[in-house]
Image (cartoon, helix red, strand yellow):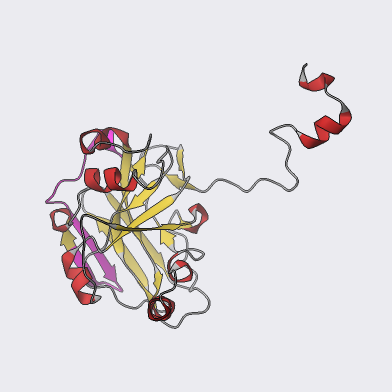
Amino acid sequence: MTASALPAAALARYPSPMTTIIPSPAVPTLPVQGSDLRFPVRRIFCIGRNYADHAKEMGATVDTANPMFFCKPADAVVADGADLPYPSATQDLHHEVEMVVALKAGGSDIAVDDANALIWGYGVGLDLTRRDLQAQAKAKGAPWDVAKAFDHSAPCSALRSAADGQPSADTVLTLKINGEVRQKATLGDMLLDVPHIIAALSTLFELKAGDLIYTGTPAGVSALHRGDHYEAELVGFATLSGKVV
C-alpha cells in the first residue's frame, strides 16, 4: 500500500518526513577557507585534560587510558568572527584555546590507523567555561553541563581542508587577549594525538560526518571580561578573532 492509499488516521500517525509541527531549526555551519561552501555542524565533542600543564594548573589528574570527554550543543558554535555575548549566571568566564578537527565520515570502534582518513579539515576554537559553575558542580559531584554546554560556548574559525595540509607536532597553538599572549603550546604537547582521540571517542559515540572535536587546551586559561578582544591561531592553518560584549 502506498502512502497516498493509507487511511487518514494512519497518515496522521505517520506524517511525511518533511512535515514538522514547528519550523525546523537551522543547521549551524562554519565557513570554509577559500570557498563559498560551508561546513554543517552535527555535534561538538571535547576532550579534557589533554595537556599535562593544563591538568596541573587545574589540580587534576590525568588518565590517558580513560580520556575525559564532554559535549556541547551544535548551536553553541560562534562563527564568522561574530561578537561573543558574555554568558548569564557567571562571574568567571574562562577561555581555553584548542585545535578543532572536523570530520567528513565516522563510525564506531575506529582503529587508530584509520582515524586520519575521516578528517575533513582543521580550525581553531575556544572552549569557553563558566568556571564558577564548574567549581560548584565539582564540589557537589554533579555534571558539568551548565559550565560547558551553554549558548555561544564554542567559537570556531573558518575550517581549512586537510587536503591543503595537516598540522604536525611542531604546529603552534596560541591565544592573545587584548594583544597579550595568554596561552601557547605546540600540538606535540598533547597527551593524546588526534588519531588516538578519535579512536577513543568512537568507543563511546558513533561519530558521523559534521562532527567537530575540540582537542584540548594548554596551560594559561584565565578570565575573559566584557570588552576583551581575543585572537586565537593554529599557526599556518587557521585564525579566529572576536570581542566579548
Q: Give the percent coordinates (x, y) of residue 79.
A: 45, 54
116 left or right of 125 in image: left
On whether residue 227 falls in the magenta region, the answer is: no
Picture residue at 42% right of the left edge, 37% below the top: 209
Picture residue at 38% right of the left edge, 48% below the top: 212
- Quadrant for the N terminus in the image: top right
Total marks placed: 0
130 left or right of 61 in image: right
Picture residue at 20% right of the left edge, 57% below the top: 64
Q: The magenta stretch spans which residues?
A: 161-184
Q: Give the percent coordinates (x, y) of residue 135.
A: 38, 79
Image height check: is 203 above or below 18? Answer: below
* Nearer the observer, 10 or 128: 10
Picture residue at 39% right of the left edge, 67% below the top: 128
Residue 211 falls in image quadrant: top left
* Nearer the observer, 9 or 100: 9
The extreme right residue here reads: 8
Residue 3 falls in image quadrant: top right
Q: Give the percent coordinates (x, y) of residue 141.
A: 40, 75
On whether residue 167 falls in the magenta region, the answer is: yes
* Nearer the observer, 121 or 229: 121
Image height check: is 132 above or below 11? Answer: below
177 left or right of 144 in image: left
